[in-house]
Image (tube, helix red, strand yellow):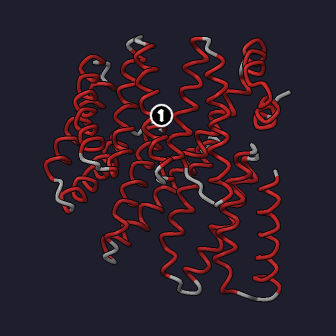
Amino acid sequence: MEALGCYEKAEALYRRLVEEEERRELANDLAGVLMIKGSALWILGCFQEALGCYEEAEVIYRRLLEREGRTELANDLARVLMIKSAALENLGRLKDALRCYEEAVAIRRRLVEEEGRRELAKDLAKVLVDKGLALEALGRHLEARKCCEEAIAIYERLAEEKGRRKVANELVDVLKRGDALLNSGRLQEALACYEEAEAIYKRLVEEEGRTEFVNDLEMVLMGKFIALWTLGRLSEAIECFNESISLLERMVKVGMSHTVPNLMWSLWVRFNLYRQVGDWEVAAQDVVRSLTYALPLFQTGASTKTLMSGLEGLRKTLRKLPNKEWAQLVAALGEKAEMVRKFAQRS
């Protein structure tokens, strides 16, 4: 709440400068503050208010882009549309979210393919994946697959350009096969694919120091976890998640702050795992750690779809806990119980 108050003061200041004193050059800064405020509102469970902030930021970027010719802000508009899409998805407005993703794809495709902004190719791949997931949720499976295939092609090309053709092709083939097998219910074969990819990524990260592959290794561990969990091998699944979290924590400690959202999401998932096996001491620790990792990100204005989704998932889980389980969690939290009560908005 204290952070939100700071953001509201900053918003009021920039709004006065832009709207009353006609400091139009600060409109971009006002949009940035609105984005940060939206993220803070999202964490507090004020979802509609958060969406309102994103929509106002979108209006500002559109005006700067379309009326004032600030073409350098095109990718910022695409970024706003992506975050707005995530908000719409969480509010159950999938079709509206898809329209935002489609516009974000169009913007980034134009920047990359027509204007030669090749440094944004990875951003284009990211929004293609998000669009694919939205299409999948709407049951439009063929279109979803096409989006993901295009994203994969972009990632492969980027890897080739960096001199990693063999690694890229080898891993993409393994992961695609693993995902296909998992979706087909052929769990043992999928698990074998993920373990093969895991061995490759571990060699790259741990032996060769290729830290750019950390997120990829974490994704592989996630696929392996899903396969193990679905197979009923719960202790192995938890062990896999523990390894993923340890990896991400190491990366955070050496300054790779972009891995924090993935770490928080993993902690939320592991909370659910330990909840199911009745280990409330560890479950409580993961709740506290998730909230502790969130605060610095919001204070510095960092916000991603993964971060918002992870925290919202945690809040929903806490709110829906049966009274008996909630009491067990509160008891395990000790002096941290009040902080978690406020976050979950539950007495």
Give percent across and percent down for residue 25: 66, 86
Left or right position of 21 against 176: right
Residue shown at 48%/55% (left/top)?
A: 101
Quarter of the view holding residue 11? bottom right
Residue shown at 44%/46% (left/top)?
A: 251
Nearest to the observer: residue 21 or residue 192: 192
Image position of 85 with respect to 75: above or below: above
Residue at mark 1? 245
Residue shown at 52%/62% (left/top)?
A: 79
Give percent across and percent down for residue 160: 18, 58
Outermost residue toward the left? 166
- Amino acid type at mark 1: Ile
Nearest to the observer: residue 88 or residue 301: 301
What crowding class fits label 1: few (fewer than 14 Cα within 10 Å), some (14-19), or many (20 or more)?
Answer: many
Image position of 158 with respect to 71: above or below: above
Quarter of the view holding residue 278? top right
Left or right position of 195 against 31: left
Outermost residue toward the right? 347
Nearest to the observer: residue 275 or residue 25: 275
Give percent across and percent down for residue 267: 56, 32
